[in-house]
Amino acid sequence: MDALQREIDAYDRMRDHLETEHFRKWVVVYDEEFIAAYESFEDAAIDAVKRFGRGPYLIRQVAAPPTVISIPTVLGYAHD
């Protein structure tokens, strides 16, 4: 199993709690743990990059369908 899939699986295990406590917030999951909730995707992405670099980590809006986005591209970072 790849690292991102582990983060997705961890999110799925936390889903009920996250929907109760952080409905429609953006959350970061890293190393299979909930890190924090944010008001916007941009806030979540900026903090995740500062804390964990290029990842992998999961950023997802609670109770919204999943979307896959390349963080370096969104934040204007050049690819290596």
Image (tube, grey):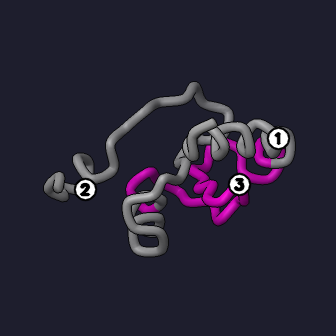
Q: Quick one: which residue is furthest to the top in this view?
A: 65
Does the residue at mark 2 contact the one at mark 1 (Cβ under 8 Å)?
A: no
How far is the residue under mark 1 from the one under mark 3?
10 Å
Give the percent coordinates (x, y) of residue 32.
71, 54
Q: Name the residue under label 3.
A: 32
Residue 64, compared with residue 34, is above or below; it is: above
Going by the numbered disc 1, the residue's amino acid type is Arg
- Cβ–Cβ under 8 Å for marks 1 and 3: no
Q: Quadrant of the C terminus?
A: bottom left
Amino acid type, label 2? Leu
In the rendered view, tell whether residue 30 sits above or below residue 13: below
Residue on which disc 1 sits: 13
Secondary structure of the residue carrying tag 3 is loop
Q: Earlier in the sequence, mark 2 or mark 3?
A: 3
Q: Give the range drawn in magenta.
A: 18-43
Depicted 48 relative to depicted 68: above or below: below
User: In the structure shown, which secondary structural element does the residue marked by tag 1 occupy?
Assistant: helix
Badge 3, how many Cα within 10 Å: few under 14, some, many 20+?
many
Residue with the mark numbered 2: 75
> Which SS class for mark 2?
loop
Q: Which of 32 and 20 is in front in this view?
A: 32
Please report the residue visible at 46 percent of the width from the left and 30 percent of the height from the top: 67
**Of marks 2 and 1, the one in the foreground:** 1
